[in-house]
Amino acid sequence: MGESRSERRRRSEQGREPGTGSAGAGVTTGALARRLGVSPTTLRSWDRRYGMGPAVRSGGRHRRWTPQDVAMLEEMCRLTSAGVPPAEAARAARGLSGPPAPGAGGVADEPALLVPAAGAEPLGDPRQECKGLARAAVRLDAPSVDDQLTSLVERHGVVVGWEEVMVPALHAVGRKWESAGDRYVEVEHLLSWHISRVLHRAPGPVGPGAPATGAGPIVLACVPGEQHCLPLEALHAALVEQGLPTRMFGPAVPPEALTAAVRRLGPVAVVLWSQTRSTADRPLARHVAATTWGVKGARARPTVLLGGPGWAGRTEPDMLRPAGLREALSSLVNLSGGRTGPPADGSTGPPG
């Protein structure tokens, strides 16, 4: 007599972990996402962008992940939670090494590891965090917005908080505003103000940090005419979190003032933010990149990073064009010598 259906099911489930499928078939995407604390969309994105998919693919609709695939993705999660940019983390997790990203001239060959915020935790479900923040903003519940943002940065750090919760929440509120006329302008203003406030309070690293190389500070400024500086504030907060010396000049900096500051400070890098093409001042960027300081025969000049969508289009020689906050932060850590903490002698000014 043949086996009953219940007996066959019991036998097929031997060696199976809850939600993973049979041991031989591998782990499902949903089960793996729950295990790693990321969304299935993130796993599919890593597969599409960085080739971090299962080594063996079946002809069916559902992908299965082998123990080797799981170990690779666990390493990917560990590296990204430590602040390593996803592309670099993927190369390391696969055991591969590749050339630096295009346009990374002047950056050290080996990427510096970003120091995670003290006690930083992986973010569970960013969609729920984003929804909770957006709902509090729509209610104009300022205390709740502030509490949620403060907890977000304290628990997960600036980079994760900005990329996975703050920006999506701002976009969601912006879409609601566009679809409802001017009814939600106050919501966007309230949310933006509280995000700015929390970013200004971002803590620095705990402990003395690694010895610094004595490189100059990092200058952050919006180009003339540019008033939108919230993403620049996020970068400033992330740099503070890393313990790197910065000088934040904010929106609409006049060219003469910016040039004078560069000559006085001798920065290792200057980040110029432009939100729209109408404000992107390429001659100014070239002028800043050519500005020198120091004694004759030992002059130095800054590396210029062009931040924001306003710089889209043709590239500028010897300037970096980071794709986002993580990439900008990684480049600036490398330019500063891969070190965090203030210079040992407390100085930040230009040589000579």
Image (cartoon, rainbow, N blue to C red):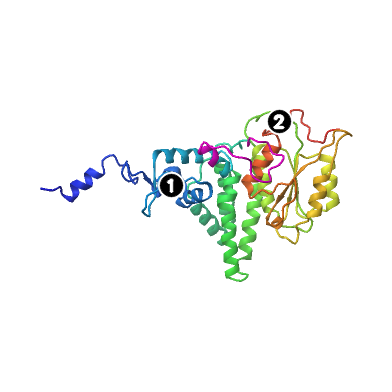
Mark 2–mark 1 distance (CA, rounded to whole Å): 38 Å
Residue that badge 2 annotates: 212
Q: Which residue range is magenta in the image?
A: 90-111
Q: Is 280 in the magenta? A: no
Name the amino acid, label 1.
Ala
Question: Looking at the rendering, which quadrant does residue 24 occupy?
Answer: top left
Residue 299's mark? none
Question: Could you tell me what secondary structure mostly forms the magenta stretch?
Answer: loop
Residue occupying the far bottom of the picture? 181
In front here: 28 or 56? Answer: 56
Residue occupying the far left of the picture? 1
Q: Is mark 2 on a helix, strand or loop?
A: loop
Name the amino acid, label 2.
Ala
How many discs mark residues in the rendered view?
2
The spot of residue 36 in percent (x, y) is 45, 43
Q: Is 100 in the magenta? A: yes
**Residue occupying image coordinates x 80% and y 50%:** 286
The spot of residue 185 in percent (x, y) is 63, 65
Residue occupying the far right of the picture? 296
Residue that badge 1 annotates: 33
